[in-house]
Every structure is written in structure tokens, then in C-alpha cells.
Image (cartoon, rainbow, N blue to C red):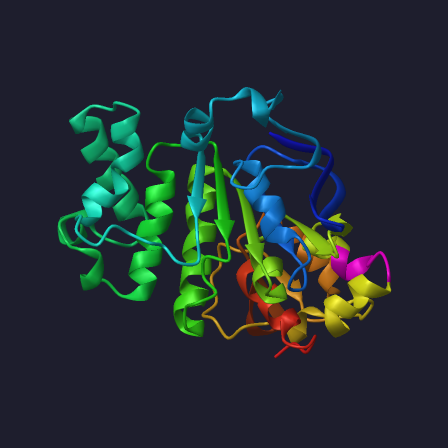
């Protein structure tokens, strides 16, 4: 879907992005992470040409991004910022409708899409479509920002630290909502964050950057099992190289017989594999049910200094 071929961004004598090559697959949730100033936001913004690259090529749908008309390309790439910047004088419906209007969608199709997406993101259309941004909480405005990026049904969504300004409860709820939404819409999402917990929770694959270069690309499991170097180990903290068992991660949820049961002494490597195809795993110690594990909770627990709860 998106390919970086030896891409650099140079400011004076500084390489903000330094000879980056990578492939982002269609339909995957790809997270860019790293310390402040590592080049992750610059990398993201080069995809939709908000920042011009200095050398190399970026391909979108097998064509160099430079070959697209700028406005048409951006219509095919949704963009969600930390500061949503909704138009304050427009209703939520009109904020969301801007790109479909530019693409000359019919009124009926726009209204149907606005209502569908609002309902999917926990903002009942009947209740919210005619409100104004000032009438919404920060978390609700952020949902509208996500809906606006999805409104014209683009294949790619760029998200630049979209939840970092929210309180922890709102942030966790939006992360959960985004994972649920992605399971339904299957977009290609490139997501920038500085939060290792967020990266591990959301990402199908993670790209860890440092000083403009890629240190490692892999799944959360691969980062846990095989950190590439000392920088990677340091960045993800005490998580790498430790042995964890299912009993350490069991969350006190009611038993649900539709999900698979695993013993408490199962190594987490096996649980990780199961969570790729199972929403939840029930955990038993002997004959006693002690809780369940989900993908959403396991990486959040791991990221808290590497100490499961």
C-alpha cells in the first residue's frame, strides 16, 4: 500500500529522516514510535506531502506520491491531528461532510455516511449531527475528527498523536473504540505516538525510530521476544527478555464459555499467538477460573514498567 524507498528529509546539515526504507501493508495498523525528535511525525507528514521529502521515493498504490494531484491524493488519505481544529461555526454534520462535498457526493450519500460513522463511533447521529463543536467534550471532538477523516472512505488514515491531549480514561476508551472500528472498516492506519503502551495496544506492527533512522520494525510480540539492540531494549523497558505466565495477566471478568480456556501456567508467548485469532482467553488455575486475557489489556499491563498487575 505505502512503500518508502531510501527516503530522507534534510534540514541544513541535519537528517530529520535518514535513509528510511519500509513497506506498510494494506489494512494494517502501523505505529510509528520513538523519542521526541526522532523523525516519526516528519515521516508521517511526508506521506501526504505536508512535508516534501529531500531524497528517495514514497509510493502510494505503486505510484510515486509526486505523480498524484495533491488535492486528489489527500482526499484518499484521511488525517487526524492531536488538535482536531473543527470548524466552530459548522455543525458536526457539516464538519464531517467537507471532503465528500468536494468529491461531489450526493446529499443523500453524505447524510447516510455521516450517520453511519457517527453511530459506529458511539455518537448517535440523531443526537449529535446538529450540534456544534463547543457542545462536545474533548473525547467527543476527537471522535468527530476520526469520523471526518473517514468520511470520504479513504483507504489510508494518518493519525498524529491524536489522543495525547486527553485524560487517561478518555484516551483508553478511544483506543478501545479505534480498535473496534478498525476491525470493521479494515483501513490502512499509520499512527504516531510517543507512548509505548499505546503502541503495543494498537499496533499490528510497530516501527521504532531514533535520530531519523529505523531501529526495529515488528509486531509487539517480536519486540518482546527479540529486541534488536540495546536501544530497543532500553526504550521498551523491562519487558524484553522476561518470561511471563497467563496467571499474571488474568483480568477479573465474568466467565464466558464461548471462549477458549487455558491453564494459568501457560507462557504468554502462547497466549500472544492465540490472541491473534481469539478476542479473549479464559484462564484457570487447577479447576478454578481466575479471569480472562484480551489483546487490549495485555500490552497495557506490560507497558507499565514491565510489571503485570
Task: Look at the image and tell me whether residue 180 can be seen.
Answer: yes
In percent of width and height, residue 272 lies at 68, 56
Q: Which one is in front, 134 or 129?
A: 134
In percent of width and height, residue 178 lies at 44, 52
Q: Which one is in front, 309 or 105?
A: 105
Q: Is residue 263 above or below residue 146?
A: below
Q: Which one is in front, 74 or 27?
A: 74
Task: Look at the image and tell me whether residue 286 can be seen.
Answer: no
Residue 226 among magenta residues: yes
**Residue shown at the point (84%, 56%) measured from the top left:** 228
Range shown magenta: 223-229
Q: Is residue 196 above or below residue 48?
A: below
In percent of width and height, residue 199 lies at 60, 58
| Residue at far right of view | 229
| Residue at far front of view | 12
Q: Is residue 218 above or below residue 175?
A: above
Task: Report the side of 145 relative to 12 (left or right).
Answer: left
Q: Which one is in front, 156 or 227?
A: 156
**Residue shown at the point (22%, 32%) measured from the top left:** 110
Residue 26 among magenta residues: no
In percent of width and height, residue 185 lies at 43, 38
Q: Quadrant of residue 254?
A: bottom left
Q: Which corner quadrant holds the N terminus?
A: top right
Q: Which corner quadrant holds the C terminus?
A: bottom right
**Residue shown at the point (64%, 70%) measured from the top left:** 303
**Residue shown at the point (17%, 51%) measured from the top left:** 89
Tally the numbered discs: 0
Amino acid at each position: 500500500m505505502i512503500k518508502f524507498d531510501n527516503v530522507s528529509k534534510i534540514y541544513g546539515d541535519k537528517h530529520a529522516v535518514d535513509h528510511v526504507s519500509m513497506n506498510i501493508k494494506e489494512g494494517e495498523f502501523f505505529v510509528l514510535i520513538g523519542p521526541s525528535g526522532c523523525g516519526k511525525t516528519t515521516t508521517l507528514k511526508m506521506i501526504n506531502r505536508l512535508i516534501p521529502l529531500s531524497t528517495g521515493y514514497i509510493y502510494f498504490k505503486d505510484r510515486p506520491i509526486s505523480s498524484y494531484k495533491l488535492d486528489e491524493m489527500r482526499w484518499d488519505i484521511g488525517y487526524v491531528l492531536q488538535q482536531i481544529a473543527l470548524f466552530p461555526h459548522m455543525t458536526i454534520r457539516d464538519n464531517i461532510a467537507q471532503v465528500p462535498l468536494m468529491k461531489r457526493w450526493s446529499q443523500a450519500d453524505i447524510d447516510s455516511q455521516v450517520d453511519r460513522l457517527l453511530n459506529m463511533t458511539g455518537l448517535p447521529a440523531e443526537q449529535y449531527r446538529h450540534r456544534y463543536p463547543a457542545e462536545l467534550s474533548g473525547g467527543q471532538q476527537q471522535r468527530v475528527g476520526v469520523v471526518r477523516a473517514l468520511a470520504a472512505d479513504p483507504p489510508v488514515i494518518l493519525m498524529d498523536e491524536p489522543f495525547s491531549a486527553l485524560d487517561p480514561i478518555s484516551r483508553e476508551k478511544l483506543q478501545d473504540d479505534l480498535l473496534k472500528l478498525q476491525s470493521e472498516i479494515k483501513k490502512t492506519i499509520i499512527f504516531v505516538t510517543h507512548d509505548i503502551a499505546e503502541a503495543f495496544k494498537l499496533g499490528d506492527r510497530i516501527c521504532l525510530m531514533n535520530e531519523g533512522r529505523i531501529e526495529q520494525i515488528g509486531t509487539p510480540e517480536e519486540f518482546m521476544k527479540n529486541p534488536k539492540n540495546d536501544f530497543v531494549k532500553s526504550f521498551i523497558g523491562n519487558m524484553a527478555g522476561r518470561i511471563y505466565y497467563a496467571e499474571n495477566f488474568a483480568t477479573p471478568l465474568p466467565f464466558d464459555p464461548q471462549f477458549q480456556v487455558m491453564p494459568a501456567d501457560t507462557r504468554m508467548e502462547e497466549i500472544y499467538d492465540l490472541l491473534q485469532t481469539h478476542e479473549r482467553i479464559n484462564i484457570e488455575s487447577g479447576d478454578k477460573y481466575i479471569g480472562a486475557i484480551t489483546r487490549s489489556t495485555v500490552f497495557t499491563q506490560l507497558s507499565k514498567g514491565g510489571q503485570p498487575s
